[in-house]
Amino acid sequence: MKLFIIDWSKDSTTPLIEYCKGTPHKIVGTELSNGGTAYKNTAVCKPDAIIINYAVKPAHGRITAEEIRKRKLTASIPLYFINGDEDDNEKVQNLGICLSEDEFKELLDTDQSGFSVESFLL
């Protein structure tokens, strides 16, 4: 599966990105600082799933996700919000699936022959 990861950070990589690199899934894009750039690049990269680290800057993640969901080209791409707190997760229930980092890692590592992560979740 092709992943696009949004993980607000001042560093050039994050533990979430590094973890995903160690899975059979392909990272087709990342964005670490700018929601507008993430919005633009999700259309260019055409990922199978968009992963948002929701523990850091949840308002930025939510706004970016709302814009991605509004655009016809990216509206149907599954969104996964990782590590949000309960109150923030309630704000995005209509946009995507909220998971802890451990739950997300378990899904990435699950070998579901013939199934993608998003079909396994849904």
Image (cartoon, helix red, strand yellow):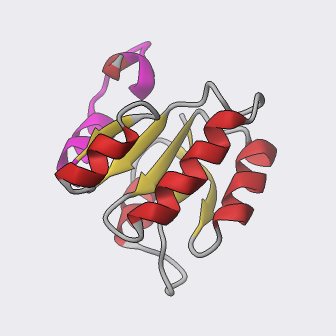
Q: Main secondary structure of the magenta part?
A: helix
Residue placed at 65% from the left, 43% from the top? Answer: 68
Q: Quadrant of residue 56?
A: bottom left
Residue placed at 59% from the left, 30% from the top? Answer: 77
> Looking at the picture, how far across and down is residue 122, in whole percent?
36, 16
Q: Quadrant of residue 85?
A: bottom left
- Residue furthest out toward the top: 114
Magenta extent: 100-119
Q: Is residue 105 magenta?
A: yes
In which quadrant will I find the N terminus? top right
Q: Is residue 75 left or right of residue 122?
A: right
Q: Is residue 11 above or below residue 16?
A: below
Q: Quadrant of residue 48?
A: top right
Disc tally is 0
Residue placed at 27% from the left, 31% from the top? Answer: 110
Q: Is residue 77 left or right of residue 46?
A: left
* Most foreground residue, 115 or 82: 82
> Looking at the picture, how far across and down is residue 59, in whole percent?
45, 63
Q: Is residue 50 above or below residue 31?
A: above
> Looking at the picture, how far across and down is residue 102, in whole percent?
18, 50
> Looking at the picture, how far across and down is residue 12, in whole percent?
55, 82
Q: Is residue 96 magenta?
A: no
